[in-house]
Image (spheres, rainbow, N blue to C red):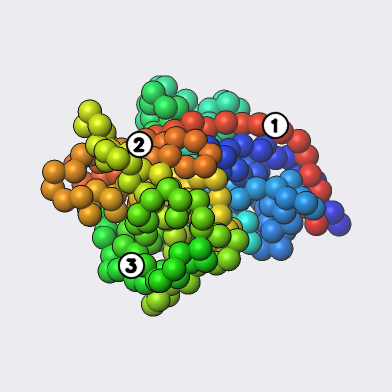
Amino acid sequence: MPQTVSFTKGHGTGNDFVLIPDPGGALDLSDDQVAVLCDRRFGIGADGILRVVRSSALPEGAATPEAEWFMDYRNADGSAAEMCGNGIRVFARYLVDVGWADVDAAPLAIGTRAGVKTLTRSDRGLEVDLGPWTVEPEVLVRAKGVGAPRPGLGIDVGNPHVVVALPDHAELEGLDLSVVPQLHPEPVHGANIEFVVPSDPLVHEGVGTIRMRVFERGVGETLSCGTGVAAAALAVRHWAGPAAPDHWTVEVPGGVLGVRMVDGRVLLSGPATLVYSGEVTLA
């Protein structure tokens, strides 16, 4: 029998999501149902689904007792993902707007498959502490519109990324990300792939600036990727050496995000917008 559910559409710098409230954990969305909801012609249209569920309603072993709410994030193809830096800000904005949380009273803890993340207010909107990061070995990246394969630096910020430096804006704009970039060797769980161009000068008044485009696994090219923005800033900082700044501005097709590194942790800040709400019948 068809099931009708409530939803809210939201986005963070153009990285868009369908939020489905499921406090009691009653919904079990199939990969196909997620894919249909995210389809931009036959569904609502989104880069992913954010199921809003109480941690206490999760199966045994999956709960995050230190966080009341859990962000069950699914890519547009239905696959589960560890984290989403834009999605978690939109998720927090939803909790606040419906009265289920108060980010102004205390930092807001949200459970994810990459652990519990904490959010606070910031000048850009909301800031999420993504936690520590790790630098992984380089891999070769083949992408349409770029000649020879380029080295890409692995950066893990709770989910895996590969960051490729390009020499100029023309090459960045000439990328054809309708074709899946190839990684050699391919990481076991795949990776999001960021292509970046440093600004000239790279650093102005203590803040680094870069431009970025991204191919997200399970989705394709998106207008923005929060964890990818953090990974891109971390990679450029790594390449720049010990004198590189800890504050970065990252320009993506969907807008501008902020990244800062504090005591071995990386924090991401930016806007979160709720667009409209409605009901949908699940296929």
Indicate left or right for 150 with 86 as reference.
left
Name the residue at the right extreme: 1
Look at the picture and state if 188 lies above or below 272: below
Q: Quadrant of residue 17 in the image?
A: top right
Indicate left or right for 267 with 99 as reference.
left
Residue that badge 1 annotates: 276
Query: Looking at the image, which residue is at 37% across and 56% down?
Result: 166
Residue that badge 2 annotates: 249
Q: Nearer the viewer, mark 2 or mark 3?
A: 3
Residue that badge 3 annotates: 151
Q: Nearer the viewer, mark 2 or mark 1?
A: 2
Q: Quadrant of residue 126 in the image?
A: top left
**Mark 2 element type:** strand
Look at the picture and state if 91 lies above or below 220: above
How far apart are the alpha carbons under marks 2 and 3?
23 Å
Query: Looking at the image, which residue is at 52% across and 32% down?
Result: 272
